[in-house]
Image (cartoon, helix red, strand yellow):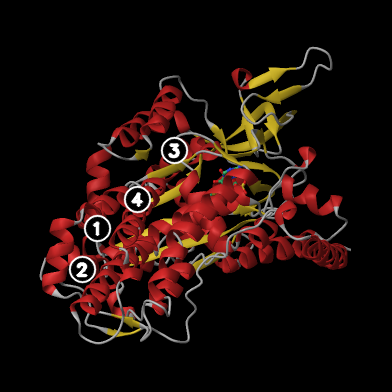
């Protein structure tokens, strides 16, 4: 039954198969963005960049935005004594700024306070209602404002001493609430949702599929989809009933449709989402409520949910009360935004929580970006070895000699030969840490090759065999840098663009299919023609990060004064915007 329904809906979308629609969750505007939020966006962005690189004929679309309604936002604005609309504008703008700095290449940034979204919510409500999936009932239960959800007794923890109850999962307090609301008959869709969840590769990683199936194995209570307007006034009114406002999660989930122009039929050009990126804390909403709402409305549910785990900081959950929230803008001052992107994708794995530690970030960025990638580029571009500043062509006899008689040459060829295939496989599963592993291993092989080939013992210039051997070593090293640069573009768009600019690789030759063009795929040399490096681009890709205590005393005093100045400037700016 479900699948004949979906099949029918799918047929409508056949001619639009060339679209790949990806979404991030929309972010609450109760507080400024932190690295956890950025992580959701960076995963989605890297995924989309890979899709564009690998499937240039597919239209990839990325949507992100801010979730601006509900009690939580009402309370945050009141606490800052700012009108709620102004408060939303301010925090939403901060998300845009951070995403711009982090090069999140979105096609749309949607805000739930926009008119186009309100129209979509109203239409969706009518759709549910006209299909008989909304009823009114007296409802009572424990509501968690912070998580914006009602919780059942089994989802609560009772603090014996104070008598207060808390959400077991998030730890946030709950309050007893009795009201008459509109309800959604979730139980009627439980079997359909279970069926949807069980489809191959629907929920990734598999661990989260299991969590959903466990939840779905128990009877699920119906969901309250409205709140009394006198309690939650900062919300979208229920159509034709101004005493009620739409439940924030129903409102928020519909953003994925309103971004596409729903209810205008044009939304079908991209629907359903190919992949929705979400954190593990919002799995129930996206893995149960969302497909149920969509099926009830007669729309196809998403093809895949990619669920990621969370970042802790020095082993602790990030929270304002612990004063350990990592602000991406601050972190980028130390690591650069590209460094931060790389660290999040390189160190984070979807199935378990990652720990953000300064020591680890420093170690990874210095060893991989500065010493392995950056250093190799500087060496290959050094004037002493490369006085004419060329990306030379390999000479056939020297190439076959280096590949046959130098183990390090063979190992480099082997690493580059497998680079595209392995990285493709890892990108397809959003395993960014494995992409980094593979590329860094190839760069280690290239560094090792460079060391073993000893180019500094050969004399540059002219057409002597020595000079030709030297050119061949540089050509092979630059091929390695070029291929790794292409592969790492989705993870570090700006740093790799500087690398490929320096190597003077035309934009049209930076796509996935160009990974097949290098000395590693044909012994006759199959890389780009010999050409000049770009003299306007720097060969310094990533400056080693030096710890405060390692800097000379004078420099330390300077940077302390600098950070004091920028801190007070920031504080002045924040109090000006918040007051
Ligand atoms: N507004 C809802 C989502 C509605 S989508 C229709 C929401 N917003 S949020 O701002 O709280 O979270 C947005 C995203 O940030 C979620 O994917 C969440 O998992 C992620 N993160 C929040 N804290 C995080 C960490 N500490 N670590 C990693 N990601 C984290 O939920």
Q: Identify the mark nearer the N-term, 1 or 3.
A: 3
Tell me which corner region of the image, top left, top right, bottom left or bottom right, holds residue 560.
bottom right
Residue closer to the observer: 156 or 482: 482
Pointer 3 residue: 287
Mark 2 → mark 4, Cα distance in angstroms: 17 Å
State yes or no: Cβ of the residue under disc 1 lies below 8 Å from any atom of ligand 1: no
Q: Which residue lies at the image location 70% right of the left edge and 39% below the top edge?
A: 146
Q: Which mark is residue 441?
A: 4
Q: Identify the mark nearer the N-term, 2 or 4.
A: 4
Left or right position of 470 against 366: left
Pointer 2 residue: 518
Which one is closest to the eye, mark 3 or mark 2?
2
Circles 2 and 1: CB atoms closer than 8 Å? yes
Mark 4 → mark 1, Cα distance in angstroms: 10 Å
Please identify the quadrant where the N terminus is shown: top left
Secondary structure at numbered mark 2: loop
Mark 2 → mark 1, Cα distance in angstroms: 8 Å
Tell me which corner region of the image, top left, top right, bottom left or bottom right, holds residue 80.
bottom right
Q: Which mark is residue 416?
A: 1
Q: Identify the mark nearer the N-term, 3 or 4.
A: 3
Left or right position of 314 against 218: right
Residue closer to the observer: 174 or 463: 463
State yes or no: Cβ of the residue under disc 2 lies below 8 Å from any atom of ligand 1: no
Secondary structure at numbered mark 4: helix
């Amino acid at each position: 039954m479900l699948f004949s329904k979906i099949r029918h809906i799918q047929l409508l979308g056949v001619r639009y198969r060339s679209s790949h629609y990806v979404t991030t969750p929309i972010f609450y505007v109760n507080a400024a963005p932190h690295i956890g939020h950025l992580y959701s966006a960076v995963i989605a962005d890297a995924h989309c960049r890979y899709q564009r690189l690998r499937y240039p004929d597919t239209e990839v679309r990325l949507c992100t935005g801010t979730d601006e309604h509900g009690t939580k936002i009402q309370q945050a604005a009141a606490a800052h004594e700012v009108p709620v609309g102004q408060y939303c504008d301010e925090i939403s703008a901060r998300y845009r700024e951070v995403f711009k700095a982090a090069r999140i290449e979105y096609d749309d940034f949607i805000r739930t306070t926009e008119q186009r979204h309100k129209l979509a919510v109203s239409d969706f409500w009518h759709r549910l209602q006209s299909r008989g999936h909304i009823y009114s009932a007296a409802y009572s239960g424990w509501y968690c404002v912070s998580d914006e959800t009602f919780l059942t007794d089994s989802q609560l923890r009772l603090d014996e001493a104070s008598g207060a109850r808390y959400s077991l999962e998030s730890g946030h307090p709950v309050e007893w609430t009795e009201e008459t609301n509109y309800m959604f008959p979730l139980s009627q869709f439980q079997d359909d949702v279970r069926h949807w969840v069980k489809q191959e590769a629907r929920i990734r990683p598999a661990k989260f599929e299991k969590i959903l199936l466990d939840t779905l194995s128990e009877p699920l209570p119906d969901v309250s989809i409205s709140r009394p307007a006198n309690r939650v006034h900062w919300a979208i009114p229920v159509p034709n009933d101004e005493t009620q406002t739409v439940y924030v999660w129903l409102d928020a989930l519909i953003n994925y449709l309103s971004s596409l122009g729903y209810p205008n039929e044009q939304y079908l050009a991209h629907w359903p989402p190919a992949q929705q990126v979400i954190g593990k804390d919002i799995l129930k909403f996206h893995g149960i409520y969302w497909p149920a709402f969509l099926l009830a409305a007669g729309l196809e549910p998403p093809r895949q949910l990619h669920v990621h785990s969370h970042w802790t900081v020095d082993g602790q959950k990030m929270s304002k009360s612990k004063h350990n929230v990592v602000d991406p803008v601050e972190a980028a001052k130390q690591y650069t935004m590209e460094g931060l992107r790389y660290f999040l994708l390189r160190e984070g794995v979807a199935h378990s929580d990652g720990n953000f530690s300064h020591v680890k970030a420093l170690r990874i960025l210095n060893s991989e970006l500065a010493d392995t990638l950056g250093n190799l580029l500087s060496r290959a571009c050094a004037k002493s070895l490369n006085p004419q500043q060329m990306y030379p062509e390999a000479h056939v006899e020297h190439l076959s000699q280096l590949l046959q008689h130098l183990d390090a040459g063979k190992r480099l060829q082997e690493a580059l030969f497998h680079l595209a295939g392995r990285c493709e496989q890892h990108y397809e599963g959003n395993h960014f840490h494995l992409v980094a592993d593979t590329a860094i291993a190839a760069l280690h092989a290239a560094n090792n090759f460079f060391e073993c080939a000893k180019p500094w013992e050969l004399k540059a210039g002219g057409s002597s065999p020595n000079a030709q051997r030297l050119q061949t070593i540089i050509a092979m090293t630059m091929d390695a840098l070029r291929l790794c640069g292409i592969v790492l573009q989705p993870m570090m768009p700006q740093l790799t663009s500087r690398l490929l600019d320096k190597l003077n690789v035309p934009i049209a030759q930076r796509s996935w299919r160009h990974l097949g063009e290098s000395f590693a795929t044909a012994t006759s040399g199959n890389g780009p023609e010999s050409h000049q490096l770009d003299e306007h681009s720097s060969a310094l890709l990533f400056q080693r990060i030096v710890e405060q205590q390692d800097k000379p005393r004078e420099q330390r005093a300077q940077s302390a004064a600098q950070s004091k100045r920028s801190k007070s400037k920031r504080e002045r700016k924040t109090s000006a915007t918040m007051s």
